[in-house]
Amino acid sequence: MRLGAGLMALLAALVIGPGVVAAGAQSHAVSGQEILKLTQQYVDAAPKRYVGSPGHDAAEAFIKAHFAPEVAKGDFVDDRFTARTPIGPVTMHNLLVKFPGKKDGIIVLASHYETNYPLKDIHFVGADDGGCTTALLIALGQYYRTHPPQGYSVWLLFDDGEEAIGSSRMAGSDQLYGVRHIAAQWSGDGTLARIKALIVADMVGWKKMNIDRETNSTPWLLDDLARAGKDTGHSNYLFKNTLPIDDDHIPFKDRGVPVLDVISYEYGPYDASTGDYAYHHTAEDTMDKLSATSLQVSADLFLDLVKLINQRAAA
Ligand SMILES: [Zn+2]
């Protein structure tokens, strides 16, 4: 027999294709396929989850239902607060899940979970924006439940009110409500000083995602991200674009916490008429844009980052 051209191409792809070796040849601590499934379940349960909506309650319930053991142990915190917004006072909820480690110090992994209030009248489900990263954090939590952190504690922060309420573009003080609230609270109670790193996951599920070199992030954490790319064989998913982004890490950066924004801001073709990517904050942000491979890459990077931050402390 001889190898057909198709099979040759397949073999070549297995050897050199981006992500193919990692996705096909190794078993993974956290499965991208599972995260994709979980994302589907989340956007089915709470397709519209803007602040104050019944869908928002459903989103909170979905997250909480996945952390029953942590709820029972008292390691699940519902941080409820009232935000002053352009539509008046709004009740918001940050949800925090704690996986205690063995060393003093905390690594926080964060994602916003709500959808945009200004997009409430279109079919906006935020599959990539808020959907897949909520699922990613849930999946990481399932991993840390069965593999408790041996170094620093790992806290998952599902933060609320990341998106602007008064317009579809984030601007000024009408954004980042949840993280601004909890950063202030943690500043007051001493928690902030114990945070070794805060890593934000945002928009990391697109089929063509490529994680930005986000320049508001702390340089040594960008170095660790590059290192994680090498460790996991995913370097080709990193740093095509370099840009600063106003995201959930900023209130912590402003208070001196080392921060990293893991985000692929590019999302679909660039639309010159809006000055934005076509799937960002539009009805196009749907499940079919995502891939298990991208979510696998993201999960692998997050797990490795936590490992590297712990190693850094030991060095
Ligand atoms: Zn958004």
Image: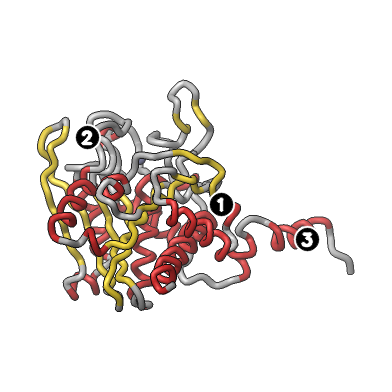
Q: Which residue is mark 2?
A: 173
Find the residue positioned furthest to the right. Answer: 1
Q: Secondary structure beneath disc 3?
A: helix
Nearer mark to the viewer, of 1 and 3: 1
Q: Secondary structure beneath disc 1?
A: helix
Q: Secondary structure beneath disc 2?
A: loop
Relative vertical location of residue 4 with respect to residue 116 in this rendering, above or below: below
Disc 3 residue type?
Leu
Relative vertical location of residue 103 with respect to residue 10 in this rendering, above or below: below
User: Left of 45 or right of it: where is 34?
Assistant: right
User: Left of 109 or right of it: where is 289?
Assistant: right
User: Which tag, 1 or 2, sits closer to the chain's start?
Assistant: 2
In percent of the image, x 18 and y 63: which residue is there? 77
On residue 237, the disc is 1
Relative vertical location of residue 216 with respect to residue 110 in this rendering, above or below: above
**Cβ atoms at labels 3 and 2 below 8 Å apart:** no
In percent of the image, x 35 and y 48: which residue is there? 130
Quadrant housing the C terminus: bottom left
Q: CA distance from mark 3 to mark 2?
A: 55 Å
Neighbor class of circle 1 (other Cα within 10 Å; few <14, some 14-19, many 20+) is: some
Count of numbered tags: 3
From the viewer's side, name the closer residue of 84 and 231: 231
Quadrant housing the N terminus: bottom right
User: Left of 303 or right of it: where is 51?
Assistant: left
Q: CA distance from mark 1 to mark 3?
A: 25 Å
Q: CA distance from mark 1 to mark 2?
A: 32 Å
User: Which tag, 1 or 3, sits closer to the chain's start?
Assistant: 3
From the viewer's side, name the closer residue of 208 and 46: 208
Q: Position of residue 217 (x, y in %)?
A: 40, 48
Q: Which residue is mark 3?
A: 7
Disc 1 residue type?
Tyr
